Amino acid sequence: MGATVGSAAEKSVASRFGVKAGHLVQEFGYDDDVDHELRGMIEGHIGSELLDEDVDDVVDVVVYWWRDGDGDLVDSLMDALTNLGDGGVIWLLTPKSGRRGHVEPSEIEDAAPTAGLHATSTISATGDWTGTRLVSPRSGRR
């Protein structure tokens, strides 16, 4: 799928998510409701498949699909930090307001610092998903 993605779309993904060719991107929370087009664009840009949650490699970026009812957000974010390299970023993707599984922004704002993270920005990732960029405060801004 990634080979057919146009370069303009890939550049858009790269600029919005900070992924680069050759980056290792680990994915958590995959289910039937994820945005497959977004996944394909990320894979097309990095030149490989997204790594699943069982991989032990050091990764540059984590993409975490999170819905209300998925469990404890703090614990899940801490799990996502396990393989994240220095200066790495977690993109927490949550359903937009009005969609099934919507997560209130205040829940993310409360959970992030407890997990040792700082929310730096929020984007409209797709028609159904909002993305919140989370970093370790000690990693600085990139």
Image (cartoon, rainbow, N blue to C red):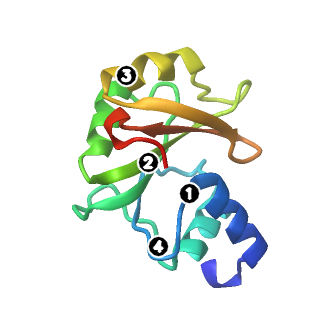
Q: Amino acid at mark 4?
A: Glu
Q: Which residue is mark 3?
A: 113
**How busy is the neighbourhood of tag 2: few (under 14 within 10 Å), some, or many (20 plus)?**
many
Q: Are marks 2 and 1 in contact (CB under 8 Å)?
A: yes
Residue 43 percent across, percent down from the top left? 55, 71
Residue 54 percent across, percent down from the top left? 26, 58
Q: Amino acid at mark 2?
A: Val
Cα distance in 3D space between marks 3 and 2:
14 Å
Q: Amino acid at mark 3?
A: Pro
Q: Where, by quadrant of the figure, is residue 104 drawn? A: top right
> Of callouts 2 and 1, which one flags the residue occurring earlier in the amino acid sequence?
1
Kindly state the secondary structure of the residue where label 2 is placed: strand
Cα distance in 3D space between marks 3 and 1:
22 Å
Kindly state the secondary structure of the residue where label 3 is placed: helix
Q: Which residue is mark 1?
A: 18
Residue at image x 73%, y 77%?
A: 7
Residue at image x 49%, y 19%?
A: 109
**How busy is the neighbourhood of tag 1: few (under 14 within 10 Å), some, or many (20 plus)?**
some
Q: Which residue is mark 2?
A: 89
